[in-house]
Image: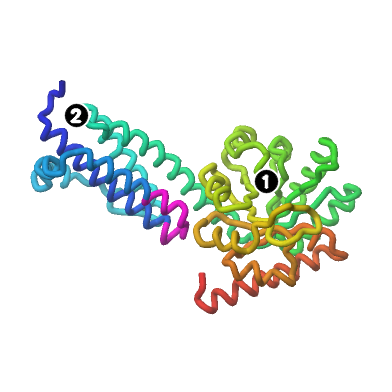
Amino acid sequence: MTDLPDTSVLRIIDAALNRAGEGLRVVEDYLRMVLDDGHLARRAKSLRHDLSLAAATLEPSARLAARDTLGDVGTQNTTPSEQSRGTAADVAAASFRRVAEALRTIEEYAKLLDTPLAGRCEAMRYQLYTLEKTTGIAADAQQRIAGARLYVLIDGRDSAAVFAELVESLVAAGVGVIQLRDKSLDDRQLLSRAEQLVAATRGSTSLAIVNDRADIAAAVHADGVHLGQDDLSVSAVRRIVGPDMLVGVSTHNIQQARQAVLDGANYLGAGPTFTSTTKQFSEFAGLEYLREVASEISLPTFAIGGITPDNLHQVLATGIERVAVAGAVANAQHPAESASRLLEALQHSSAVRTTSGVS
């Protein structure tokens, strides 16, 4: 039995429902218009819809009758910090906290009533925690990978000396991300090449990524590790590399891309786009998949698969602004020069989009 009259309980729940709904709208607007992330914005909208359905389990007239805004002493209780926010991200973070607190309030007080509201709010609270985490990852990734337009995959070369020369030339050319991917090296050789890669990129704007091997990425303190669809999960890799290392995921359709976002990936590879000289595929995601990703996902995404200076314009026309290449650079007679030409084309495209008002 409750020691409060139903009117008081309904009044508490009504106020919390209003706070939660308002907070979710603020979060949704941040995801739509600041992060420009249609996927996460739809998740927020879905939560808001679920909240409305949950609220409908209460008698609307009884809920409104219990409302007493003018008599609520809490409307006058404010703190200086409530009136100030530093950034749009701060606004979203405060709203996430407000929604979580409101959902918990509803969950606890709804237990005093004969309603399924408590269980529904508990489920929504856990969904909110996931949305908050993925929102933070997306915002952080946009900043950490902001300047990386070109991603180059390289193997270990025939010797450590040749490998070092290649990496140093790519760093000097301004390549944003360099991934070590070599299935033919034994573990000790791979570790040694990874150490060389990290040493060469340290202090530069280039990021050092190790393909697949989270253990080696962690051992050499690489900037990140890249995973395929059949590799370890993002959550499993996080237990090896920790929360701060970048984790990229290869995706081949929009469902995989959406899931990678929710799993906590920091960036995506999207493809294969065209026929590749370095890797064989039975199916191609193509340009249409790139358009899908560009239209709804804010995580930095690199188009991959057979991309060359000749077809780069087709990729950029989809809205994707980053590309990953292997053979077009690594197998070129002068890899650094090939990388520079791709970077010039990417930068020219960015300048044209800025001048034309496209962002």
Residue 226: image tag: 1
Q: How many marks?
A: 2
Residue 70, percent across and down?
Answer: 9, 48
Q: Residues within 10 Å of mark 2 (few under 14, many from 20)?
A: some
Q: In the rendered structure, which disc, 1 or 2, sits on the residue that comes first in sequence?
A: 2
User: Which element is circle 2 on?
Assistant: loop
Q: Please say which color scheme the image uses.
A: rainbow
Direction from residue 55 to residue 232 in the image, left or right: right
Screen quadrant of the N terminus: top left
Tag 1: amino acid? His
Q: Residues within 10 Å of mark 1 (few under 14, many from 20)?
A: many
What is the quadrant of residue 351 in the picture? Answer: bottom right
Mark 1 vs mark 2, foreground winner is 2
Residue 113: image tag: 2
What is the quadrant of residue 225 in the picture? Answer: top right
Q: CA distance from mark 1 to mark 2?
A: 49 Å
Residue 249, percent across and down?
Answer: 63, 47
Q: Is residue 42 magenta?
A: yes
Q: Choose between 210 and 236: the one closer to the eye.
A: 236
Q: Are marks 1 and 2 in contact (CB under 8 Å)?
A: no
Residue 99, percent across and down?
Answer: 32, 43
Direction from residue 330 to residue 294 in the image, left or right: left
Residue 231, percent across and down?
Answer: 67, 39
Q: Is residue 180 magenta?
A: no
Which span of residues is magenta-colored? 32-45
Tag 2: amino acid? Leu
Q: Residue at x 50, y 53 (%)?
A: 139
Q: Choose between 205 and 56: the one closer to the eye.
A: 56
